[in-house]
Image: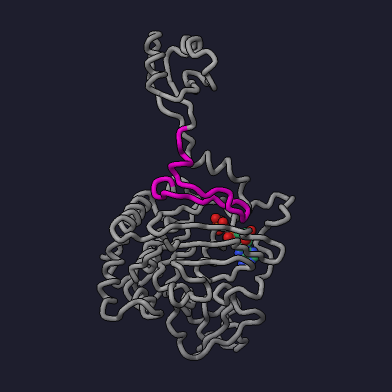
Amino acid sequence: MTAAIRTVGLTKRYGSVLAVDGIELDVPPGDIYGFLGPNGSGKTTTVRMLLGLVLPTAGTVEVLGARIPKHARSVLHRVGALVEAPAAYGHLGARANLSIMDAAGPGGARRTRKARIDQALEQVGLAGVGRRPVKAYSLGMRQRLGIAAALLRRPDLLILDEPTNGLDPRGIQEIRKLLLDLNSSAGTTIFLSSHLLAEVEHLCRRVGVVDRGRLVLQDSLAALRAPTGSVVVRTPDPEWAVGVLDGDLRERSGDRLVVRAADPAELNARLVRHGIRISELAEERRTLEEVVLAATTGSSDRVDGAVPPTMGVRSEVLSSDDSAWDRPPPGPPMPLPTRRPTTPSPLQSPRPEPTRSEPDWTGRCSCGANCGRSRCTAIRSSSTSRGWLVV
Ligand code: ATP
C-alpha cells in the first residue's frame, strides 16, 4: 500500500542550525496523524519540505507516492495545505480569494468551481460572510478561510500546520468535527502539526513526536496510552487500604493510591472484601502530555544563554536552495512590475495589498523615492522589502 506521506532521513540545515535531523515519517492512507513537538523543534520546516516549499539538505520525501519536489506538480493538487498564517488578498472577499486560488493551478475544474467554493465556505462556517473584504475578518475567520482554501479541491491529503490557531473553543470543536467527518466520509488522510496536545488527543490515531529536529516517537495513540499495569484508587479509608495492599502499593498521596494490579476488578473485589470503601477506581494510563513531556527535552526556541550547538534562534541566513517564496528579495527595494501580479498558487502568499503613500511627520511624502512632494502617485506596497509599484 502506498503511504500518504513517507520520508527517509529527511534533514534540513540552515547554516549551523540543524532544524530537521533525519526524520522518518510514515503516514498510511486514511490516517489522522498528529505531528507534535515543542516550539522550534522543526515541525513547520518538515511541513514545508513535504510541500516542496523548502528543499531538504538530505533525505527524501514521498507524498501520495510521488517524490517531492521532483513530481510536486503532478500530485500537489491532490493535497490541501495550510501552513502557518493563511494568506489572502485583504481587499477581496472570501469567494473572490478562493476563486483566484482555485484558478491558480491544476486540479480544479472551472465548471465546478462555484459549487466547490460554496461547499468549502459552508464546511468552515463562512457561508454567510457575503462580500465582506478579508481585511475586515477576525483572526478566527481568516483561519477558517485558510482551511476552506485547503478543502477547495476536495483533497486526498490535508496537511495542516496549527489549523486551529486563533480559534475559540467552539471554533476548535467545529474544525475537529469537520476533519473527523472528512476522514470518515471521504477517507481524507489528515496530517496535522500542532503543539496543542488536547487537540491531537481528541483527533488523531497516530502521533509522531519531534524534539530538537529528531523524531523521538512514532506510534498509535492507543499504544502510547495503553494501561501501565497499575490501578488508581481513591478511598476514604487510605490507612486501612495501605495495610491490606501491602507490597502492591506503588504510590500514595492523601486518599489517592496507585496500586500494582493487572486486573482492576480483582483489586476492587479484594478491597471490598476487607470492608474498604472506594470512591474511584480506574486503570492508570499516561496522558499524551506525560508521554510527550517524557520524550522531549523542552522548547527548542528558548534562548537562555547557552544555546545548544545544533539549535538556535532564527539568526542564520537562508541557504541558497530555499524556495524564493520564503524570502524577500535581497538588497535594496526592487521596483515591482507596473502590471498587477498574476494570480498566486494556492501555496504561495499573495502579494500584500498596496496602500497609497501618505505624508510623514515632516509633511513630506513617505513614498521613500525622495520625491519631495506632500503626496505623490506612488503606490506603496505594505511590505517595504517588496519595493514600489508606480501607477
Ligand atoms: P513552532 O511550533 O514554534 O512553530 P516549529 O517546531 O515549527 O516551531 P520550525 O519553525 O520548523 O519549528 O523551526 C525549527 C528550527 O529551525 C528553529 O530553531 C528555527 O529557528 C530554525 N529555522 C526555521 N526556519 C529558518 C530559516 N528560514 N532560517 C534559519 N533558521 C530557521
Toward which corner of the image does residue 18 lie, by quadrant? bottom right
Q: Position of residue 301 (x, y in %)?
A: 63, 54
Instruction: Tell me if residue 201 can be seen.
Output: yes
Task: Reply above or below: 380 against 235.
Answer: below
Give whichever of 9, 109 is nearer the camera.
Answer: 9
Residue plotted at (50% across, 18% down): 254
Q: Position of residue 341 (x, y in %)?
A: 47, 85
Residue plotted at (54% across, 80% down): 359
| Left or right side of 348 for 265 | left
| Left or right side of 108 for 235 | right
Q: Position of residue 128 (x, y in %)?
A: 26, 65
Task: Reply above or below: 373 against 218.
Answer: below
Toward which corner of the image does residue 342 lie, by quadrant? bottom left
Residue plotted at (45% across, 68% down): 65
Q: Position of residue 142 (x, y in %)?
A: 40, 64
Residue plotted at (44% across, 67% down): 64
Stretch of the chain drawn in magenta: 201-227
Ligand 1 shows up in the quarter that is bottom right
> Is 205 inside the magenta-drawn segment?
yes
Question: What sort of colour scheme is used for the picture?
Answer: one colour
